[in-house]
Amino acid sequence: MKTFELKILTAEKTFYDGPCESLILPISDGHYGILADHQNTIAAIVPGILEFTVPDEGKQYAAISNGTFLMEDNQVLILAITAERPEEIDENRARRAMEEEQEEMLRQQSIREFKQSRLRIEREMSRLRLKRKGTYQDFD
């Protein structure tokens, strides 16, 4: 299968930098798939599950926060606040963080604060789903 270059950068580290056969990103109206030679694109990423296929290694999964991706000249650059593999997620900590955000959301007074809390809750929900399920097909 043809490949393209994928670079996933977070605020803390380079999460992945190498060849990729396919990529599925969470966006506001669903999922967005990319294969080699895809048209140039830029879009926002929402918190969710990222799936990418690495040659000779198979499918890889990550819980990703909000961010942006750019596909240009057969190269994809993803900029996100966080990206975590299932083994990096502490399920109890993620559950507590989600519960705290849900409580905070009830106390929000502005629309902006409400939306920020909702994004943080979606991130924690994605982390929990990834940790519990482990495969992309199990998420729906």
Image: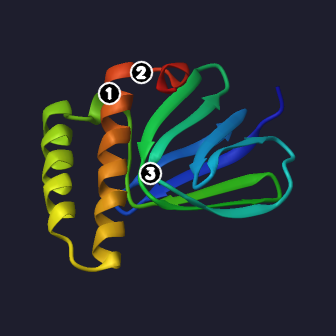
Query: Counting other residues with Cα less than 10 Å from the Cα at mark 2, is it few (<14), some (14-19), or many (20 or more)?
Result: some
Where residue 137 sits in the image (x, y, percent)? 55, 20
Residue drawn at x 50%, y 62% is 67
Q: CA distance from mark 2 to mark 3?
A: 16 Å
Q: Which sits in the foreground, 59 or 115?
A: 115
Quarter of the view holding residue 11: bottom left
Kindly identify which residue carries mark 3: 47
State the image coordinates of residue 71 (x, y, percent, origin top left): 74, 58
- Tell whether 98 sits left or right of 19: left
Q: Secondary structure at mark 1?
A: helix
**Type of amino acid under label 2:** Gly
Q: Is residue 62 above or below residue 66?
A: above
Residue 131 marker? 1
| Amino acid type indicated by mark 3 | Pro
Vertical relation: 83 (above or below) 52: below
Q: Secondary structure at mark 3?
A: loop
Q: Residues within 10 Å of mark 3 (few under 14, many from 20)?
A: many
Q: Quadrant of the N terminus?
A: top right
Q: Which residue is mark 2?
A: 134
Tag 2 and tag 3, C-beta contact below 8 Å: no
Q: How did the renderer colour the structure?
A: rainbow
87 relative to 96 in the view: left or right: right
Crowding at mark 1 (Cα within 10 Å: few <14, some 14-19, many 20+)? many
Left or right: where 101 falls relative to 23: left
Q: Residue at x 13, y 56 (%)?
A: 103
Which of pointers 1 and 3 lies earlier in the amino acid sequence? 3
The residue lying at 39 percent from left, 20 percent from top is 133
**Nearer to us: label 2 or label 3:** 3
